[in-house]
């Protein structure tokens, strides 16, 4: 592995931008492929026309799953990158601690400009496959990235390819909907939609809506819709760590939480809960999360990549610490797979680690040792009765341990105490005050330390 690598980065969302910056900082030459015409990924709001109305349960044509009313679910102090704080400044149109989504996009665009990343991005260029290059001479591993760029007339261009020393996958994982399986749904007369395609509440006016799932999107969307719908019912699993107190006031007289899943749908429009109770609904809105998907990894002739990285019940693996597939490390890596985390911080730490490993400054354990670590992690999950689909869920109490571990790999100290305190306080506030946690909080005492740390990075 040369100390300076030519690296393909797939995606220019927050993860891809963090990766590009850290790779270049380490002396590498990153090229970022981005399907869209601009940076920001998820944070580029796409109105309802972007989604395919004929496919309300599918990804449709849209990448972003943002709805119009979305405000961040983390305070801006904890959302920002380590040395580029997300503080309200003169260019902020929305200085709130939990701002609306346009403010996050503004921040990411500013990050890209500040670190001169835009010139590294090939916009409107979609990666269609990644394969090992067999003809790069001297036995060095090379990776052939095939891509298609949109031409100025809007038509798709020819398939082109380029060879890289390494590929960093940053394609995001909030686009391919996962839908609840409900017996009898094919005979149920109502409409269905996934939260990926939800933008504004208008179309639910006067309707009885069954929202399935009560993670941040389900929490927000059920309240958004309650403003116009006749009734909103939320069906949710009540299992650790997702136990929700369904007796908490929802803040809307027409919004009810049911800690019970839906067992079946009937032809008369009824949705029957596991406890036998039933609601006649007009619409089901699945707020049931997303599937990891890497369509460009399955196309190699000898199946090497497809054989080395599987997605099984939303477990992407085997991966050492959610980043490196042991057999292909360090040439292939993934940034941003963990969820229920502090995303931008984790992206930056993982990116620093990948960049340092690629330059040879940081060392990975042997392939066998990484594989043993992965096996031990999977065995531990199994022993705890934790389903595979939560492999990348860092919200089970292991987030800080993971952040500190990656930070230490990169030679950084443990993460600052205020970051951890703020995250814990926000999670508690969300559980206690789901209606108002973005406007009322108890962690003001952590702000002076945060701002003192930020002042080290003001430029
Ligand atoms: P994305 O932002 O999805 O970017 C991936 C990029 O890859 C996209 O630009 C896409 O066009 C591109 N791409 C994909 N495939 C290809 C290909 N084959 N070729 C070329 N380009 C490709 N996080 C927070 O910190 N705070 C919040 O409040 C918060 N709220 C959220 C609310 C919602 C509804 C959702 C869905 C997510 C939220 N998140 C939040 C998490 C959010 O996803 C992350 O903050 C982050 O933006 C994800 O960045 P990413 O780069 O991993 O993925």
Image: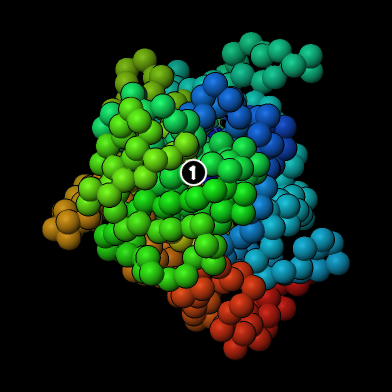
The residue beneath circle 1 is 208
x, y (%) of residue 92?
80, 63
x, y (%) of residue 157?
67, 13
Q: Quadrant of the C terminus?
A: bottom right
Relative vertical location of residue 74 with respect to residue 288 in this rendering, above or below: below
Side (left or right) of 71 relative to 264: right
Name the secondary structure under disc 1: strand
* Residue in the foreground of this view, choosing between 126 and 387: 387
Relative vertical location of residue 22 with respect to residue 434 in this rendering, above or below: above
Side (left or right) of 4 relative to 403: right
Side (left or right) of 5 relative to 373: right
Q: Residue at x 49, y 57 (%)?
A: 255
Relative vertical location of residue 352 with respect to residue 283 in this rendering, above or below: below
Q: Residue at x 56, y 53 (%)?
A: 226
Q: Quadrant of the N terminus?
A: top left
* Residue in the foreground of this view, choosing between 146 and 213: 213
x, y (%) of residue 89?
81, 68
Q: Which picture quadrant has residue 329?
A: top left
Q: In this view of the protein, can residue 259 be seen by the observer?
A: yes
x, y (%) of residue 332?
42, 38
Residue that lies at the very extreme toward the right in this rendered image = 90
Ligand 1: which quarter? Answer: top right
Q: Which picture quadrant has residue 381?
A: bottom left
Residue that lies at the very extreme toward the left in this rendered image = 383
* Residue in the foreground of this view, choosing between 451 and 102: 102
Q: Residue at x 72, y 69 (%)?
A: 96
């Amino acid at each position: 592995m040369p100390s300076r690598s030519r690296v393909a980065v797939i995606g220019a969302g927050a993860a891809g931008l963090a990766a590009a910056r850290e790779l270049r900082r380490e002396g590498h030459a990153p090229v970022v492929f981005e399907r869209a015409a601009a940076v920001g990924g998820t944070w580029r709001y796409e109105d309802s026309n972007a989604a395919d109305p004929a496919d309300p349960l599918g990804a449709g044509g849209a990448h972003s799953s943002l709805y119009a009313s979305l405000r961040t679910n983390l305070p801006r102090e904890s959302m920002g990158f380590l040395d580029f704080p997300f503080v309200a400044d003169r260019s902020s149109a929305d200085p709130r601690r939990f701002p609306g989504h346009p403010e996050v996009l503004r921040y990411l665009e500013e990050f890209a400009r500040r670190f001169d990343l835009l010139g590294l991005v090939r916009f409107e260029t979609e990666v269609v496959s990644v394969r090992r290059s067999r003809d790069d001479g001297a036995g060095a591993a090379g990776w052939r990235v095939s891509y298609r760029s949109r031409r100025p007339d809007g038509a798709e261009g020819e398939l082109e390819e380029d060879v890289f020393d390494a590929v960093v996958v940053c394609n995001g994982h909030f686009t391919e909907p996962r839908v609840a399986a409900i017996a009898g749904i094919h005979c149920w007369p109502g409409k269905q939609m996934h939260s990926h395609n939800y933008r504004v509440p208008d179309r639910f006016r006067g309707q009885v809506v069954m929202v399935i799932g009560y993670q941040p999107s389900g929490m927000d969307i059920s309240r958004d819709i309650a403003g116009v719908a006749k009734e909103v019912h939320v069906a949710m699993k009540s299992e650790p760590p997702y136990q929700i107190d369904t007796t908490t006031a929802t803040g809307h007289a027409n919004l009810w939480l049911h800690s019970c899943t839906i067992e079946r749908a009937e032809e008369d429009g009824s949705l029957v809960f596991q406890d036998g109770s039933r609601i006649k609904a007009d619409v089901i809105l699945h707020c049931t999360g997303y599937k990891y998907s890497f369509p460009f990894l399955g196309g190699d002739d000898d199946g090497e990549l497809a054989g080395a990285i599987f997605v099984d019940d939303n477990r992407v693996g085997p991966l050492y610490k959610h980043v490196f597939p042991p057999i292909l490390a360090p040439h292939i890596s993934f940034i941003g797979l963990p969820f229920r985390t502090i995303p931008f911080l984790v992206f930056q730490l993982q990116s620093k680690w990948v960049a340092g490993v690629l330059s040879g400054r940081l060392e990975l354990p042997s392939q066998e040792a990484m594989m043993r670590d992965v096996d031990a992690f999977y065995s531990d999950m199994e022993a705890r009765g934790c389903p595979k689909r939560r492999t990348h869920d860092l919200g089970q109490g292991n987030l800080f341990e993971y952040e500190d571990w990656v930070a230490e790999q990169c030679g950084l100290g443990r993460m600052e105490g205020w970051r951890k305190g703020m995250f814990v306080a926000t999670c508690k506030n969300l559980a206690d005050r789901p209606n108002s946690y973005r406007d009322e909080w108890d962690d003001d005492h952590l702000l002076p330390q945060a701002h003192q740390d930020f002042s080290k990075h003001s430029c």
